[in-house]
Amino acid sequence: MGKKIKLKTFIIALIISLFSSFAALANEGLSIIPSRSGDDSKAWKYFNEDNTKVVNQWKQVNEDWYYFGEDGISKQSTWCRIDSKWYYFDSFSKMLHDTITPDGHKLGPDGAWIPADGEIAPVQDTTTNN
């Protein structure tokens, strides 16, 4: 009888341990995509708690904003038109704001391009219309 109780206890402990491990794997957050160019640049994918990939959405991570396109990869070192506004993303995929872009365009506090008088839209690298 003692062996059966020990075996049942072991099996229950094993099952609890397995379920705890799977729950720990369900973590929301960024997943890095290695750079092919060998530089410091970083592109990301973002996974929700249910392990689904974020697609065509904004995500705020700490103080920074990222946009994940149709392929689920963060925009990087590019301009992107999202909902009729232009945004610039740096080499780490962070949306820039309150600054001047590397190509000389002004960005507002929301990250959207602020055109100067007569200035044409930035070069279209990626267009996303949600």
Image: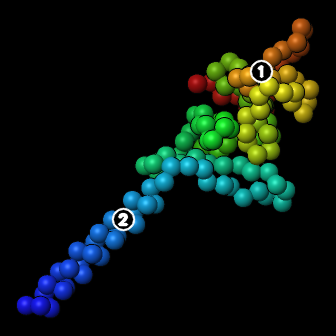
Residue at x 36%, y 65% (from the top left corner): 20
Q: Is residue 110 left or right of residue 16?
A: right
Whether residue 44 is situated above or below residue 7 in the rendered picture: above
Check disc 2: other Cα within 10 Å, few if <14, some if 14-19, many if 20+. Answer: few
Q: Amino acid at mark 2?
A: Ser
In the rendered image, residue 51, in percent from the top left (x then y), is placed at 47, 51
Amino acid type of the residue tagged 1 in the rendering: Gly
* Label drawn at residue 20: 2
Q: How many numbered dots are placed on residues in this image?
A: 2
On the image, which quarter does residue 55 sit in? top right
Specify the quadrant that holds the N terminus: bottom left
Q: Is residue 56 in sight in this rendering?
A: no
User: Mark 2 falls on what kind of element?
Assistant: helix
Q: Position of residue 75 (x, y in %)?
A: 71, 39
Q: Which residue is mark 1?
A: 108
**Eyeballing the image, is 68 above or below 86?**
below
Q: CA distance from mark 1 to mark 2?
A: 45 Å
Quarter of the figure with the C terminus: top right
Front one among 4 and 54:
4
Name the quadrant containing residue 35.
bottom right
Q: Earlier in the sequence, mark 1 or mark 2?
A: 2
